[in-house]
Amino acid sequence: MSITIFPTVEKCTSEGREKDTLVTDLDGTLLRGRSSFAYFALVAFDVGGVLRLLFLLLASPLGGILYFFISESVGIQVLIFVIFVGMKVSDIESTARDVLPKFYYEDLHPESWRVFSSCGKHCVLTATSKIMVELFLKDHLGVDIV
């Protein structure tokens, strides 16, 4: 059995990749941060206020336990539920359009962005709720599929 070790993004070339399709993860690859918790907190506060943010903080230990011991997906789904339950979709979209892009731009990994932007087609995978990231990825980064 052989293990393939891929080069780090710093060693990847960005020349002649216009016809390539790039598939990447959002958290920890395209963005420097591996955790979406700060973005969840931002949405909770912006749309739901201090009470929703407090509820998220109280539920985060449960989400963390589920994330590490059961499933990453289940842990994140708990946090997403806590944030979005009872919110209007239009309010979430408004925050995703008006507030989140500034923070996502600040967290972009420069070397990942160099390689990402050199490719012709882009697909981004993420455990974060699609409603939070899709507008930024499609409108600002030119992603084809989220």
Image (spheres, helix red, strand yellow):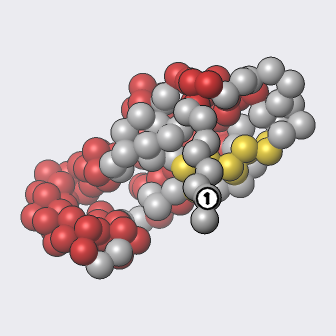
Residue at figure coordinates x 29%, y 51% from the top left: 37
Residue at the front extreme of this rendering: 1
- Image height check: is 62 above or below 38? below
Viewport quadrant of the N terminus: bottom right
**Quarter of the figure with residue 115:** top right
- On screen, residue 139 above or below 127: above
Residue 138 quadrant: top right
Q: Which residue is mark 1?
A: 2
**Residue 141 horizontal/vertical position (percent):** 65, 35
Apparent side of residue 66 relative to residue 7 in the rendered image (left or right): left
- From where the camera sits, is residue 94 visible? no
| Left or right of 112 in this view: 139 | right
Q: Who's the residue at 37% across and 45% down the image?
A: 34
| Residue at image point 86% right, 31% down | 18
Residue 107 in the image, given as x and y percentages of width and height: 42, 30
Task: Please report the residue visible at 29 percent of the width from the left and 78 percent of the height from the top.
Answer: 70
Residue farthest along the bottom direction in this orientation: 70
Q: Nearer the viewer, residue 110 or 15?
A: 15
Image quadrant where one finds the C terminus? bottom right
Q: Looking at the image, how many numbered discs can be counted on the residues?
A: 1
Element carrying mark 1: loop
Left or right side of 128 for 76: left
Q: Residue furthest right?
A: 19
Q: Nearer the viewer, residue 70 or 3?
A: 3
- Residue 31 in the image: state x and y as whole percent: 46, 37
Q: Amino acid at mark 1?
A: Ser
- The front one of 11 and 140 is 11
